[in-house]
Amino acid sequence: MEGEQDQSEYEKSFLEVPAILDKTKAAADVCNAALEFAITKCVNGADISTVCGETDAFIVEELAKTFSNKKSKKLERGIAFPTCISVNQICGHYSPCPDDSTSL
């Protein structure tokens, strides 16, 4: 019964606090921009590690612009999961170190 009460409190607070939804929308905007950025970097012969690193740097730069007023200075920002590229012969989530990288 207590678990159900905690869940309803979470849902109520999520719906009643529009700032949470605004932050989620801002994160989605940064994600979509980063995806477009990564697509432009994925050309024949591009180094995979460089593409992932540049896209991660782009995300950090865009996040610094998001909610940059005095109230949100303490707002925690960052990358939840590093940029990965799906390469044909490699199974999922490929984000190599610069020493282990290959070309597209």
Image: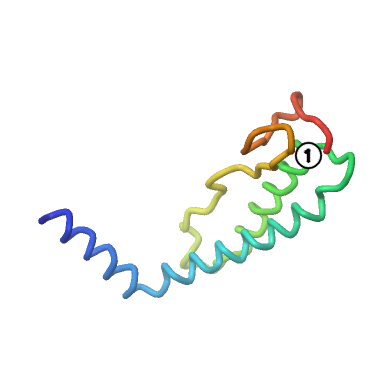
Residue 61 or residue 25, whichever sits in front: 25
Q: Secondary structure at mark 1?
A: helix
Q: Residues within 10 Å of mark 1 (few under 14, many from 20)?
A: some
Coordinates of residue 41 in the picture (x, y in percent): 81, 50
Instruction: Please tell me whether residue 40 is drawn above or below residue 17 in the rendered image.
Output: above
Seen as rendered, the residue at the extreme front is 89
Q: Which residue lies at the image location 46% right of the left edge and 57% below the top edge?
A: 74
Give residue 94's position: percent from left, percent from top.
66, 36
Q: Nearer the viewer, residue 31 or 60?
A: 31
Q: Residue type at mark 1: give it.
A: Thr
Q: Residue furthest right?
A: 45
Where in the figure is residue 35, as x and y percent of width and height? 69, 56
Q: Where, quadrant-wise, is the N terminus in this rendering?
A: bottom left
Colouring method of the image: rainbow
How many numbered marks appear?
1
Q: Residue at x 74, y 38 (%)?
A: 88
Residue beneath the point at 83% across and 34% down: 103
Quadrant in which the C terminus is drawn: top right
User: Who is closer to the viewer here, 59 or 92?
Assistant: 92
Which residue corresponds to mark 1?
A: 50
| Depicted 56 relative to depicted 101: above or below | below
Position of residue 50 in the picture relative to residue 64 (left or right) = right
User: Residue 75: x and y, percent?
Assistant: 47, 58
**Given the current orientation, which residue lies at the most extreme top position?**
99
- Residue lying at the far left of the rendered structure: 1
- At x 55%, y 50%, the residue is 78
